[in-house]
Amino acid sequence: MKIVNLTLNSTVYTSNVYLITGTSNDLESVNTLVDVGRDPAIVDKIYNSSTGVGKKRIEQVVLTHSHYDHSSLLSRIRQDFNPVVRAWAKSLGGVDRYLHDGEHIKIGDRLFEVIYSPCHSNDSVMFYCEEDRLMFTGDNELLNLSGNGTYIPEFIQLLQKLDMLEIDTIFPGHGKPIVKGVRDGIRRSVKNIGGVKYGSILKTSKSYND
């Protein structure tokens, strides 16, 4: 699996946009964008990327959630590449297939588990690859959380589930990949918020929809 962040040097505010292809660009791999962001410069970058002979440059788009900085370019990507678009959000236009918690989808040449994560937003999902022990987390903040907040039960249950997984690398919706201390960071979050009372207001991640 090859992962390229197409918005690494963007000059406009946008989420990270990850282009994932198979290691050898074989016909069975699924060229995928994780999020589409809002920087039109990624279109030329896609055309200039090595995505395999005889394959669509973008076969699939998977969205971590529908906030504008992650989804604004969707209509342009559909127009240029006609991919299958998968997302959780029922209200977002241009979605071909809705994601479900626990299902497995192929991204590049790997299988990923879809993990519903109603933390940053109520339509957020994450994508976990057991084989490579990595996860695309969108805007969910999971590491080293303090107990100074109010958390919904679903979020605590999510952290407990993640604590059982082998995760070495996180590819977030903003910023650089996290390659150190992931499992310890999740474990500290579980420990720190384990005794916090449940509430209806979730204070775990900065909102990028403001």
Image: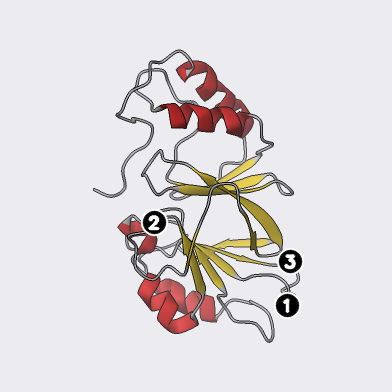
Q: Residues within 10 Å of mark 2 (few under 14, many from 20)?
A: some
How far apart in space, not on screen, are marks 2 and 1 (Cα)?
29 Å
What is the secondary structure assignment of the residue under circle 1? loop
Q: Which residue is mark 2?
A: 89
**Quadrant of the rendering where the N terminus is positioned:** bottom right
Question: In percent of the image, x 70 and y 59: which residue is there?
Answer: 110
Answer with mark 2 or mark 3, whichever residue precedes in sequence. 3
Question: In percent of the image, x 62 and y 41: which residue is there?
Answer: 179
Q: Quadrant of residue 155?
A: top left
Q: Position of residue 18 (x, y in %)?
A: 53, 61
Find the residue positioned furthest to the bottom. 54
Q: Position of residue 6 (x, y in %)?
A: 50, 65
**Amino acid of disc 1:** Leu
Q: Which residue is mark 3?
A: 23
Q: Residues within 10 Å of mark 3 (few under 14, many from 20)?
A: few
On screen, residue 14 versus residue 101, left or right, reads left
Q: Which mark, by number, is residue 46?
A: none
Q: Which mark, by number, is residue 27?
A: 1
What is the secondary structure assignment of the residue under circle 3? loop
Q: Nearer the viewer, residue 98 or 176?
A: 98
Q: Is residue 67 above or below residue 61?
A: above
What is the secondary structure assignment of the residue under circle 2? loop
Question: In percent of the image, x 34 and y 58: which residue is there?
Answer: 69
Q: Nearer the viewer, mark 2 or mark 3?
A: 2
Q: Position of residue 169 (x, y in %)?
A: 62, 43
Q: Nearer the viewer, mark 3 or mark 1?
A: 1
